[in-house]
Image: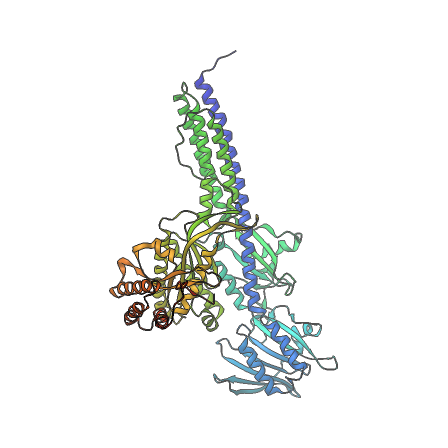
Amino acid sequence: MPRITIRFALIALLLAAIIPTATGIGVSAYLNSRATVEVLWHELADEMIEDARQKVLLYVESGTAQLRLSKLLTDVGFIDPADREGLLKYLHRCLLAHPNVTWCSYAGVDGAYISAYREPDGRLRLTRREQEAGGTRYRDYRVAPDGSYTLIFDTLGDFDPRTRPWWPVAEHATEPAWSEPFLFASRRQPGVVLVERQDGKDGKMRGVWLMEYELSAIAKYLRDIKESAGPGGGPQSHTDIYIVSGQGKVIGHPDAKTAREGKNGPELIPAREHEDRKLAMAYAHTQSAPNDERHFEVTADGERYLAVSAPFAEDGKPDWMVLIAVPAEALLGRIYENNRAAAWIAALAALVSVLIGIFIAERTMGRALRGIATDLDQVGHLHFSEGGSKDKSSIREIAAMHAARDRMTGGLRSFARYVPADLVRDLMERGKEAALGGETRELTIYFSDIADFTSIAEMLSPNDLVDQLGDYFEEMSAMIRAEHGTVDKFIGDAIMAFWGAPREVEDHALAACKAALSCQARLAALRQVWAKEGHAEFYARIGINTGEVLVGNIGSDERMNYTVMGDPVNVASRLEAQCKRVKLGIIVGQRTRELAGSAVVARPLDKFAVKGKAEGIVVYELMALRDEATPEQLRAEALAEEAMRAYLARDFADVVAACRKLLKILPGDVSASELLARAEGLTKTDVPKDWDGVMVLTDK
């Protein structure tokens, strides 16, 4: 039997191990990566479809309740369509109440058409179009800012509402119904009409109530969804979203390409004939594919696209379709690049391994096996650094290979379940799979919201509000992340964050205090910019508390959220709410103040027990970092501490003296004024022996 050297055997063993392993890992990594990317793409596409649905429905569905109200008021005799002047005034008010609507109208079976509408520059006009022997009498009125209106022209035309595309829809409707999109007669702009049939007491059709919408705003919504990701925002920045009517006409395009010049004037473009070929091909595929095939691929102009289709509304009203298309290269290109790089790395690794095998042929094979285990472990963490363990045990190497494999599998599987990148990275590095559960840790919790947000929201248009809130959240989140905080969620105008998880943060209470001060400073700078631009000015209230909380994955196996729960979380929320009452920007809890130590300047305000809790804590106004504090802030802190010590020691006369000095530095301060008044009252009464100075809050 031929003999072979250990060198040759080791080389053969290394080659036999490395080549199949590298190939298997490469193929597995490619398949898993592609599957993961496709799953994430499906989730992202579904979110984008839902986003498009909600924004467009918010734009076009506000009129349903208004139409039903108009019909009801007519049925009970509150509105008489024959009273043209009264009807004009009513429609004017309807238009003012619905800023997304272009036309609020009533059309009668006698051919009359009474309407209030918006001009392209935003000004309002009223029109009466009534049938006469010589044609249709046009009377248009200009609406002044005070609500009065003036006749601007009176002429004859040929308009008859009974010939418009929406009239047959109204004739057969038993509830508010959508027309097919068409070009408005007056402006030649694509639009859609929501109609409600008005019957008389005899059950016969008397007229039609209408809410008419121009669809030009839909293009802006679709473009905003794409642009919200930014130039480097991943697949979303390369994704186009379209909306197609039930008759196959394009009514929503990110570049507003919905109309063209036809034989009889402007007309909506059929999706099959659109110059945007990926749209045309995707729509054609939906018409020939099975109804349940939502995710598919198309090729347009030599480029491959991943596409998704979905009905616009679950009940089919309106019967529109949402289409999404993204270049396959935007999703899978990085995978192809990584595979090519991995192939070169694998080839180089094989050559190096052969040379190393020759060098260590007469030595133990443990190092080579550990090297393979180390390589597998690095791949499992998606790292490609060199080096490995120097342990020479011949048993642990096999266990290490199994552990590396498990970590790789668990890490990749967990990737699809988490959104926060730092949390996913931490899981992959530790080789753990995402699972429900938590642990108790002392963390610092942060809550903030915008003062008088409801009033501000009422003054702003939805688009302006969303844009300014986006700027606000981006800037505040950046301040929080800069101090190693984890942004948990946005709740309306509120921000919830915490420090100390998933990774431990040294001095987490101080870090939260620094973040809060940075947020207020950055917000002050933003207010100056907003004021110059004519935007609303945001003022934030912040509550911070530290304590033992449950932190971990909360939810279900399919959908989970990494968050915190417990009384300290509730207390942080209540402290934020107290900012409004005492008119301060930042309030922190007692434990936060203790951990932050001398690095911050914070004056004690009172000893509170939040609603539902008997035990009280001393709460503080966070004023500044100590090395940035002013002499007035340092003096205020000292006087407030003096007052609080005296208050808890029942030396109420000293409390009164300290508070009066404090109010000279902080005139009108609510907290100091309350403590002064309480202390003056206590000097005149007998204080119970069990008095502990706690003020129980009666509201949340």
Q: Residue at x 37, y 63 (%)?
A: 586
| Pick the front one: 557 or 141 | 557
Residue 93's x, y, as percent? 55, 80
Colour scheme in use: rainbow
Q: Residue at x 49, y 32 (%)?
A: 22
Asked if residue 169 shows in the view, the reply is yes
* Residue sitting at x 44%, y 32%: 374
Q: Nearer the viewer, residue 146 or 694?
A: 694
The image quadrant of residue 665 is bottom left
Q: Residue furthest right?
A: 202
Residue 265 drawn above or below residue 287: below
Going by the picture, which residue comes out furthest to the left?
A: 631
- Compared across the picture, whether 602 is left or right of 66 comes to left
Is 122 on the left-hand or right-hand side of 649?
Answer: right
Residue 62 % position (x, y): 58, 71
Left or right: where does residue 499 sit relative to residue 29?
A: left
Give how far across and how far down residue 73 sits, in percent.
64, 81
Residue 303 in sight in this render: no
Nearest the viewer among 669 and 337 is 669
Q: Which residue is painted at 60% across and 50% down in the image?
A: 296
**245 up-or-down from 328: above or below:** below
Residue 143, position in %: x, y? 51, 84
Q: Would you identify the image quadrant in which residue 596 lies?
A: bottom left
